[in-house]
Image: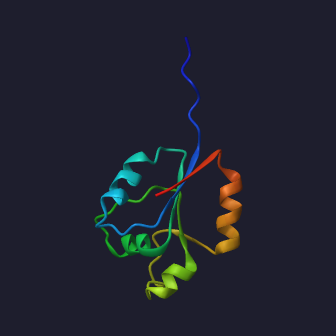
Amino acid sequence: MSSAPTRITLHILNKSPEHPRFHHCLASVSGHDALVLTENAVLALADNTITLPARCFVLVPDLEARSLTSLTRAQTTDYAGLVRLTTKYERVISW
């Protein structure tokens, strides 16, 4: 009996690192998944103790709103890029 294939997921996270859902999200990201940091989740880029997945994106307007544009621990994207990302993954989960 074979197991069901893993669905590749795009996780969109808007909670700050202090929020419990932030850590639940990170624990749910598997090797082929991607993570997009939006809103207060972009604050994670300023904390080097937080390990982010290899495929990590950050929404530029949220970086700019929090004056974090100099942080480069994730690939940047705009709203159009976020929409493109949602079409590349089998499922999308917003946290």
Q: Residue furthest top?
A: 1
> For residue 6, what is the image quadrant?
top right
> For residue 59, what is the image quadrant?
bottom right
Q: Quadrant of the N terminus?
A: top right
Looking at this view, is 76 or 95 the one in front?
Answer: 95
| Residue positioned 71% across, 54% down in the render | 87
Q: Position of residue 49 (x, y in %)?
A: 28, 65
Q: Looking at the image, what colour scheme do you see?
A: rainbow
Looking at this view, is 11 or 57 the one in front?
Answer: 11
The image shows residue 76, relative to residue 61, as above or below, that is above
Q: Position of residue 44 (x, y in %)?
A: 37, 70
Q: Is residue 68 left or right of residue 1?
A: left
The image shows residue 45, relative to residue 33, as above or below, that is below
| Residue positioned 64% across, 75% down in the render | 78
Q: Is residue 13 left or right of residue 19?
A: right
Q: Is residue 62 left or right of residue 25?
A: right
| Residue positioned 59% across, 29% down in the render | 5
Q: Position of residue 38 (x, y in %)?
A: 50, 70
| Residue positioned 43% across, 85% down in the render | 66
Looking at this view, is 91 or 2 the one in front?
Answer: 91
Q: Is residue 85 left or right of residue 66?
A: right
Q: How many circles with numbers are drawn on the protein?
A: 0
